[in-house]
């Protein structure tokens, strides 16, 4: 199913009184996700550029150790961004497929407030809580 692209009024925010996941909602979240992805890609580029420009053999051992710790943190952040970008891409695909905004487990509406806070959410709150309980139980049993 191909989603319909619409022009949004300046400052548009989805409203509960509108039909859930109407073309305006989908366009709003498409833009929100695309903008977020662009920001993450740009930050990743800056991180890579910073790491490439840094001179590694300057300073004493303490300074080098500090720099290595900072580099490690930057690389972990970059990895987190990569995973987040992957989730954003999946959310954008769900918009195109017409599945965005609905729980992958129950098919229920995820809700505008939850999607506003976490636009990559794939589970409604109840399903998310059940998933977290299962994860905690798995962690406790190890």
Image (tube, rainbow, N blue to C red):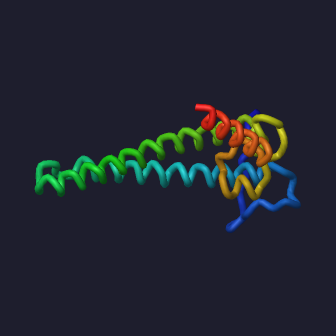
Q: In this orientation, which residue lies closer to the viewer: 58 or 82?
A: 58
From the top left corner, tell me how far across and down residue 3 is, in percent: 74, 41
| Residue in the image at 63% along x and 32% along y | 141
In the rendered image of this protein, does residue 93 appear above or below residue 36?
A: above
| Residue in the image at 60% along x and 36% along y | 139
From the top left corner, tell me how far across and down residue 80 is, in percent: 47, 45
Residue 95 appears in the picture as rendered: no
Q: In this orientation, which residue lies closer to the viewer: 103 or 133?
A: 133
The furthest residue to the front: 141
| Residue in the image at 71% along x and 41% along y | 133
Determine whether, in the image, residue 114 is placed left or right of residue 63. right
Determine whether, in the image, residue 90 is placed left or right of residue 9. left
| Residue in the image at 65% along x and 46% along y | 120
In which image quadrant can residue 86 be found?
top right
Locate the C terminus by quadrant: top right
Tag count: 0
Locate the N terminus by quadrant: top right
């Amino acid at each position: 199913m191909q989603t319909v692209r619409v022009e949004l009024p300046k400052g548009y925010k989805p409203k509960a009184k509108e039909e859930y996941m109407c073309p305006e909602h989908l366009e709003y979240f498409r833009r929100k996700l695309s903008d977020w992805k662009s920001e993450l890609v740009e930050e990743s580029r800056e991180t890579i550029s910073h790491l490439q420009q840094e001179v590694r053999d300057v300073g004493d051992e303490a300074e080098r150790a500090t720099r290595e710790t900072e580099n490690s943190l930057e690389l972990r952040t970059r990895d987190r961004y990569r995973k987040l970008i992957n989730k954003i891409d999946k959310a954008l695909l769900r918009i195109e497929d017409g599945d965005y905004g609905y729980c992958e487990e129950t098919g229920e509406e995820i809700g505008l407030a939850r999607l506003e806070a976490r636009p990559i959410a794939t589970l409604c709150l109840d399903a998310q809580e059940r998933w977290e309980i299962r994860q905690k139980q798995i962690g406790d049993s190890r």
